[in-house]
Amino acid sequence: MSAINLADKLNQFTEHWSPKIVGQFNGHDLMVVKVEGEFVWHSHPDTDDLFFVLKGEVDIEMRDRTVTLREGEMFVVPKGVEHRPVARDEAHLFVIEPVGTPNTGDAQTAAVKEAL
């Protein structure tokens, strides 16, 4: 066991929308991800979706509203709510999801999660 430096983990990759597992907690993956541009519209029928902004700014678009997150802010999208993260410039996120949750809500279209 040792401290996990999220900035060091983020420096180990450059690709966007490709979550990297940095640890696990009570059956959940703890991940960092770099984002830029628009992600796909999706929902998670069985789990909430947590976004915590480490760097930059991200809009969480939902069909009825948009929530803008800045550094140090977080938002939880309730399960079943269709949403799309959008970052005009590169942003860094910390996300928590139950192990095995596909980031697109669909295992066939989800990014493969790698452990760092």
Image (spheres, rainbow, N blue to C red):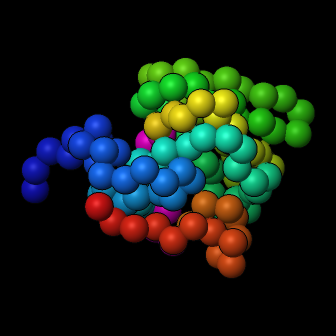
Judge from the rendering whether residue 27 lies leftward or rightward of residue 110; answer left or right: left
Against 103, residue 89 (above or below) is above
Which range of residues does the magenta coloring cover?
Answer: 93-100
Q: Residue at x 21, y 46 (%)?
A: 4
Q: Residue at x 49, y 62 (%)?
A: 98
Judge from the rendering whether residue 113 lies leftward or rightward of residue 41; answer left or right: left
**Residue 51 in sight in this render:** yes
**Residue 50 in sight in this render:** no
* Percent position of residue 30, x then y: 38, 53
Q: Residue furthest left?
A: 1
* Percent position of residue 79, x then y: 70, 52
* Percent position of residue 56, x then y: 51, 26
The front one of 4 and 10 is 10
Against 10, residue 102 (above or below) is below
* Percent position of residue 60, x then y: 70, 35
The front one of 56 and 49 is 56
User: Is residue 97 part of the magenta span, yes or no?
Assistant: yes
